[in-house]
Amino acid sequence: MQIQLTDSAQTKVQSFLDDHGAGEKAGLRVAVLPGGCSGFQYGLTIEDTPKDEDEIIDLLPGIRVFVDPFSAQYLEGVEIDYVSNMMGAGFAFKNPAATGGCGCGSSFTT
């Protein structure tokens, strides 16, 4: 499975891991959840350990990504960026599998 984090996303995730006091088994959970105005929405959380069924992606030393089997089918090739502008700051997703999305950019459809 391929997931990419831009430099700004890597910096923000590392900051969250440090703030969380995460150990070496901790990582960023990237999930796809039913909901949002287009059908699916993304979820990001810091977790101390992966679950047994998770796919574990070691992106960089110190940054691991956990993806559950349901989410994996929607996340192949996704790029995660961290953007900050006058409207606010947050993570943004470029998903080659998405065929549509909502105006606010927080949900997608395939």
Image (spheres, rainbow, N blue to C red):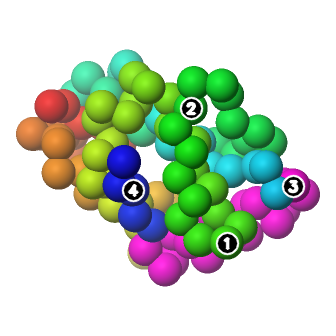
Task: Give the mark nearer the N terminus: 4 vs 1.
Answer: 4
Residue 35, position as x, y percentages in the image: 36, 21
Residue that appears at 68% across and 50% down: 27
Contact (Cβ within 8 Å) of mark 4 with mark 1: no
Residue 89, position as x, y percentages in the image: 50, 65
Task: Kindly state the secondary structure of the residue where label 2 is placed.
Answer: loop
Residue that appears at 17% across and 51% down: 96
Task: Give the mark nearer the N terminus: 1 vs 3.
Answer: 3
Q: Residue at label 4? A: 3
Cα separation between marks 1 and 3? 12 Å
Task: Kindly state the secondary structure of the residue where label 4 is placed.
Answer: strand
Task: Give the mark nearer the N terminus: 2 vs 3.
Answer: 3
Q: Does 21 lie within the magenta span?
A: yes
Q: Looking at numbered disc 4 in the image, what kind of residue is underneath it? A: Ile
In this image, 63 relative to 20: left or right? left
Q: Residue at label 3? A: 23
Q: Looking at numbered disc 3 in the image, what kind of residue is underneath it? A: Gly
Cα separation between marks 4 and 3? 22 Å
Q: Give the range drawn in magenta.
A: 6-23
Contact (Cβ within 8 Å) of mark 1 with mark 3: no
Q: Does 71 lie within the magenta span?
A: no
Name the mark on residue 61: 1
